[in-house]
Image (tube, rainbow, N blue to C red):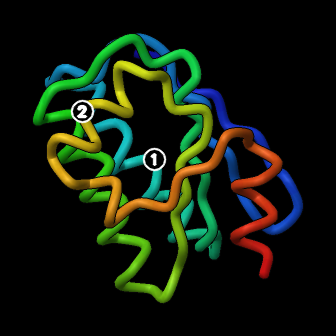
Amino acid sequence: MAIKEIKKGHCVVLELSGKLMGGDETSEIKEHVKSLIDVGVTKVVFDLRKVKWMNSTGIGALTGSLNLLNDVDGKLALANITDKIESLFVITQLSKIFSAFNSVDEAVTSLED
């Protein structure tokens, strides 16, 4: 799993790639979000276009990141969710918790409002 950080306006886009299946990669996501909060970034978009699969640990990393941002009145949006990942979000009913968008630009715009 890899994380690429891109600044867009007042938001940071974290482009995730690979599989979110536990271990170091999932803790790396939350640590990355913590480091962004430490420097004042409270609007984050996870671009999931290149995520091939995730398990409950990967979901936990996303949920943990959402909680970290909620604690500082921040916002988190998801972009480019693949059909496989979307089905996982629907089954677990996380689609009711996360704001998801078809593109990074739509997700960034939603956080700028």
Q: Nearer the viewer, mark 2 or mark 1?
A: 2
Q: Is residue 46 left or right of residue 92?
A: right
Residue, x 26% and y 56% (percent of image)? 63
For residue 32, the mark is 1
- Please tell me how crowded label 2 is: few (under 14), some (14-19), or many (20+) other residues with Cα within 10 Å: some
- Residue projecting furthest to the left: 56
Between 70 and 5, the residue placed more toward the observer is 70
Q: Is residue 11 left or right of residue 28?
A: right
Q: What x and y, as percent, mark residue 59?
A: 22, 41
- Residue projecting furthest to the right: 9
For residue 99, the mark is none
Badge 2 element: helix
Q: Is residue 62 left or right of residue 5?
A: left
In the rendered view, would you say 101 is above or below 111? Answer: above
- Quarter of the view holding residue 29: top left
Residue, x 77% and y 53% (percent of image)? 106
Residue, x 68% and y 45% (percent of image)? 13
- Please tell me how crowded label 1 is: few (under 14), some (14-19), or many (20+) other residues with Cα within 10 Å: some
Q: Amino acid at mark 1?
A: His
